[in-house]
Each structure stands twice: as C-alpha cells, then as structure tokens.
C-alpha cells in the first residue's frame, strides 16, 4: 500500500512495511564533490520514496568481523538522503528520533537494515529518521583550495533543518526532536551540543559511546591527514576517481594506525573552527548556553576497545605469551578504552550536568556467552535497531540466547523511548540523574 506525504518541496510516495509507513531515499539536500549541501529543487507531481537512496562511497567497515556484514547498497557522492519510519503520515505530532550512524567517519549508512527503526517506531509511537551523510575524505578533508572541511557535519545540520521544516508531514513534531548517535555519530551529537547553528533544532540528545577523547579535532591533525592523503593520491582529488580516493584514504588510515595497528583514531573527522563548528572556546560557550533545558543520555560499553583490539595480530601474539600475556593485552585494551571513551565521556557528562543539563549516564555490560569481544563497542545497537534476523550473524552476539536479547532489548528500548517522549528514561529500576557530586551510572546487563 502506498502512502503520500507533502513536504515543502513536493509530494513523496512511501509505502506500508509491517504496519508502519516508511519513506526511503528522501533527499534532504544535494551536493557536488567538495561543495556544501544545497537545497533540493522543488518538483511537481509525486516522487517515489520506496527505495533506498545511495550511501556514501566507502570501503567495507573494519568492524564487520564484530557486527557482521551489512547488505550492500548503491554508493554515490550525492548521498544526502533520509529513511523515515513512522506509525503514520498524519497530524499526530509524535516525538521524533533522528539517528546519526557511526563508522569512524569512513563507513556506515543510516539506511542499513541494522539501523531499521521499526521496533522503536512501533513500540514507542515515535517517528524515526536515519541520516546518510558524506564520509571520509569526501566529507571531512580539510585542504584549502580543495575542501573547507566539515562537509559531513554540514550535511547533518542540513538534515536537521529539513526535519524541522518537514517532519510534521510524516506525523512528527518538529518541536520534540531528539538527536541520537553512536561512536562517530555520537561525536556528531557532541559537536551539535555547542553549535549555534543547531540551536532550536532539537530538545534532547542520546550519546552512545562517543570517542570523546578525540576532542573536536584540530587544524594541525587535519592538515597532516590531508597532506598524507594528497601524497598517496598523487592527483587532483577534485577529478580523481572514487576508487583512487578510497584507496588513498585507506592507505592513510593504515599508515596512521602504526606498525602494530593499535591507533584506531579516524584521520578524517570534524575540525574545530571550521564551517558550522566553532572553535573550542566558542563550542564550550555554546554548550553552556544550551545546557539549561537540555536532557541527555550518555554512556559507554564495558569493553569499548575489544572491537578493535581482540583480533589485532600484535595483541594476539602478546596473549600467547605464557602467564602474563593475556593480562598485559587486557591492560592495553582497557587503558585505551578508558582514554578514548570512558573517562572523557564521564567528563562530558559532568560538564553538561554542571552547565545545567539533565543527564543520565549508563554503561552497557551485556556480553554474549560465545563472543570473544565481550561488552564491546556497538554491542547495544542490536537491542535498539533492526530486527533479530538483521543481527543474526553478528559475531559479537555469538551464543546469545534469544530470550535474553528480547528481554534486555525491550527494557533498553523502553528507556530510550521514555526519554524521547518525556525527557526522562523509563526504567523498571531507579535510574538517578548524573551529577558531578553524585555521578550515578545505570548498568545494563542481562
């Protein structure tokens, strides 16, 4: 059954999927290589929105051995499109959840089945919007004369503006928007919290496993990454083939990871003081100014870095050393996780709380009994998005009992949905607010 929604630019035609209305490949902006996002020209008649749009050009995710292999999508540079899942394209004015996927700013797609919003929309009577945006060099290269940088971040801001202008046509309330993201997507949300251009575009934020230890990204680091990329590419990136761009981008990442491949930090990411993102001082001022009246869920998993280090060849050799090897490898992994994720995330939570935000902190501890990764980076995602079938081959869920996954998933989704609807997470046991004086953390486990 086909369903129509009238946006400010024209009429879109979606369809019913499992009792919900879904619009796919919805263009929120358009772009040319290294150019800013531009408004979509209006159209007459109806535009089909029943098929996924192109995703950002990318190589396979380095976390496929952890999360599984997602379905393949058409890739294209003009990839600025949304997937909207709603209980109804009506005038109900439901709360809205806007999802920014992770993937180290080089991989991922909001339109992956893994990120399907069906369960959230159905169980919470909310509208779920998943965003595709530019990645890697095409989204975050900072090289004067070629690319100003932060284009992917500008895309995400454009998506929020589109939601504000049009989501009412899909049964959503533009004044009740929650932004949410995991990993690189969580870093996006962190950036948005202090961006003046994002003011009034959302009321609440969910920040899952932010690599907060990266900071906002520096001009010096961006310059070094750009220089390495241009050297590896060896030609003008404005005219180079996508294959050559992706190959050079991957080579820069391998080189930056070091001989032991232990540096997991992205080379192309948001840079402070570029485009819509203020410098560190301006962002901090914006964070304080915005905090009053803001509600935030923020947290990490127990073993964030196991996703990157468990299969690392150098650490696997260390683990084989008798007696002290496993303990030494564990210390390396947990120290890296504390530096990149855990400690700076708690610091961000305290900073938000001190500035006047209502903050709820969590740690996700569930570990599948047959998985070598434990409560790893991304482990909470199957409990929120997609279906059990979509995540059935995820190695990080090896040995998980379906009843355990179902029970924990319902509890987690209930908490997130309560927050989206009211600004307070809905849990069966008390979840006290996080403050600098009483830094309470809610633990999610089986």
Image (spheres, helix red, strand yellow):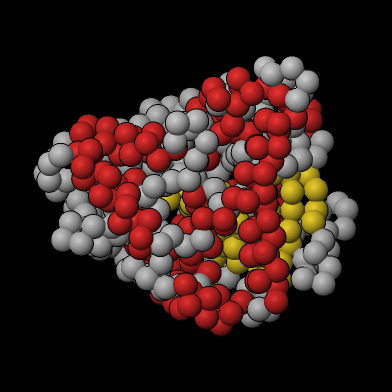
In this view of the protein, which residue sits in the foreground, 234 or 382?
234
Q: Examine the rendering and report whether any part of residue 155 can be seen.
A: no
285 relative to 373, above or below = below
Residue 430 against residue 173 in the figure, above or below = above
Residue 9 image-quadrant placement = bottom left
Q: Indicate left or right for 205 with 80 as reference.
A: right
Residue under the image location 38 percent in, 56 percent down: 221
Q: How many marks?
A: 0
Q: Nearer the viewer, residue 219 or 318?
A: 318
Residue 265 in sight from this viewpoint: yes
Report which quarter residue 384 is drawn in: top right
Horizontal side, residue 339 vs residue 112: left or right: right
Q: Of 121 and 373, which appears nearest the observer?
A: 373
Q: What is the quadrant of residue 145 in the picture?
A: bottom left
Vertical arrangement, residue 290 with respect to residue 324, above or below: below
Q: Residue at x 65, y 37 (%)?
A: 333
Q: Position of residue 255 (x, y in %)?
A: 37, 36
As drawn, the residue found furthest toward the right would be: 429
Rendered-image quadrant of the C terminus: top right
Q: At which x and y percent is residue 265?
A: 48, 45
Q: Position of residue 176 (x, y in %)?
A: 57, 68
Of residues 3 and 293, the one drawn nearer to the viewer in this rendering: 293
Q: Residue at x 58, y 79 (%)?
A: 288
Q: What residue is at 67 percent from the left and 17 percent from the top?
A: 320
Q: Position of residue 7 (x, y in %)?
A: 35, 61
**Left of 2 or right of it: where is 333?**
right
Q: Quadrant of the N terminus?
A: top left
């Amino acid at each position: 059954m086909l369903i129509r929604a009238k946006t400010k630019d024209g009429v879109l035609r979606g369809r019913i999927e499992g009792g919900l209305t879904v619009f796919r490949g919805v263009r929120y902006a358009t772009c040319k290589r290294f150019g800013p996002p531009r408004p979509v020209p209006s159209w007459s008649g109806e535009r089909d929105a029943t098929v996924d749009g192109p995703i950002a050009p990318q190589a396979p995710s380095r976390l496929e051995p952890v999360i599984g292999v997602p379905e393949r999508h058409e890739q294209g540079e003009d990839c600025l499109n949304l997937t909207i899942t709603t209980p109804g394209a009506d005038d109900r004015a439901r709360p809205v959840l806007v999802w920014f996927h992770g993937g180290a700013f080089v991989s991922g797609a909001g339109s992956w089945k893994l990120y399907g919003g069906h369960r959230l929309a159905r169980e919470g009577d909310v509208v779920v919007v998943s965003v595709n945006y530019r990645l890697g060099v095409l989204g975050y290269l900072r090289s004067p004369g070629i690319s100003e940088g932060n284009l992917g971040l500008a895309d995400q801001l454009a998506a929020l503006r589109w939601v504000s202008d049009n989501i009412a046509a899909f049964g959503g309330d533009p004044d009740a928007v929650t932004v949410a993201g995991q990993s690189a997507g969580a870093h996006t949300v962190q950036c948005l919290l202090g961006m003046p251009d994002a003011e009034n575009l959302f009321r609440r934020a969910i920040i899952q496993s932010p690599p907060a230890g990266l900071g906002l990204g520096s001009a010096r680091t961006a310059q070094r990454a750009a220089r390495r990329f241009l050297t590896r590419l060896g030609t003008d990136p404005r005219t180079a083939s996508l294959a050559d761009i992706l190959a050079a981008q991957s080579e820069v990442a391998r080189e930056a990871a070091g001989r032991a491949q232990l540096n997991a930090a992205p080379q192309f990411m948001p840079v402070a003081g570029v485009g819509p993102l203020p410098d560190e001082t301006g962002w901090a001022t914006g964070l304080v100014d915005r905090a009053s009246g803001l509600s935030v869920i923020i947290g990490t998993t127990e073993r964030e870095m196991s996703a990157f280090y468990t299969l690392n060849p150098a650490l696997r050799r260390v683990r084989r050393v008798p007696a002290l090897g496993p303990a030494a490898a564990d210390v390396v992994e947990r120290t890296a996780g504390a530096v990149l994720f855990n400690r700076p995330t708690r610091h961000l939570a305290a900073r938000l709380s001190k500035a006047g935000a209502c903050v709820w902190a969590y740690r996700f501890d569930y570990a599948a009994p047959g998985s070598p990764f434990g409560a790893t980076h991304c482990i909470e995602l199957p409990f929120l998005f997609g279906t059990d079938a979509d995540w059935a081959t995820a190695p990080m869920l090896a040995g998980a009992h379906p009843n355990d996954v179902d029970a924990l998933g319902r509890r987690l989704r209930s908490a997130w949905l309560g927050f989206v609807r009211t600004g307070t997470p809905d849990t069966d046991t008390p979840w006290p607010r996080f403050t600098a004086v009483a830094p309470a953390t809610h633990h999610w486990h089986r």
